Amino acid sequence: MTIGMKIVLAIMAGGLVGGLLAWFNQCTSGTCPLLANPWRGALIGGLLGGLLLSSQGLRAETGTLNEHVRMVRGEEQFKELVLKSELPVLVDFHADWCGPCKRLAPILAEIAGEQHERISVVKVDADDNPELVRRYQVRGLPHLIIFRQGRAAGQLVGLRPKSALEKWIDDTLKEEDEE
């Protein structure tokens, strides 16, 4: 479902609910101007539906979240972006409902921008890619895995500050260089 369709559906649903509430609660005293008639109720319901959708956050529908963070859509794309990559790849297994995942996203975007010549950052929605979740034994979210030359080089579970993530990346890549 595209972002536009989600917005239209949210506004329509909000409008329907607002219109029905106004219809069944018609104001006869004139002291309730917001829901005095079904059209105003539908308008206010539509606005509230749109606000609710935007407060929930729209899922990224494109393959790119910013210029340095990519979203994986399926196993074939995972093979191309992660397993066949010449650069090491930090894979973030996340979910829309995961609070720590949402707090981690801007940190990873910063790291991706600062270290884009050294490491790629890829996000995998755990709910949309259950086979990848099983294959890499993801048990908690956020779950980060650094892949190098098609194999997992290091894993980290949970939210960490930027400095701790940078140290983990440095240590993981250094260990791989020494082998």
Image: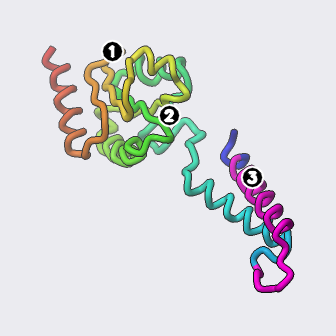
Q: Distance between the Cα atoms at labels 1 and 3?
A: 43 Å
Name above or below for residue 19 compared with residue 165. Answer: below
What residue is disc 1 on?
151
Check the image and report above or below for 21 versus 149. Answer: below
Q: Which residues are magenta?
A: 6-33
Please say whether residue 128 is one of the residues in the magenta stretch.
Answer: no
* Amino acid marked by disc 2: Met
Circle 1 Cα neighbour tier, 10 Å, few/some/many (<14 / 14–19 / ≥20):
some
Quarter of the picture holding the N terminus: top right
> Disc 3 marks which amino acid?
Val
- On residue 71, the disc is 2
- Residue drawn 44% across the image and 34% down it: 94
Q: Position of residue 115 (x, y in %)?
A: 29, 39
Q: Is residue 46 left or right of residue 121?
A: right
Disc on the earlier residue, 2 or 1: 2
Task: Name the secondary structure under disc 3.
Answer: helix
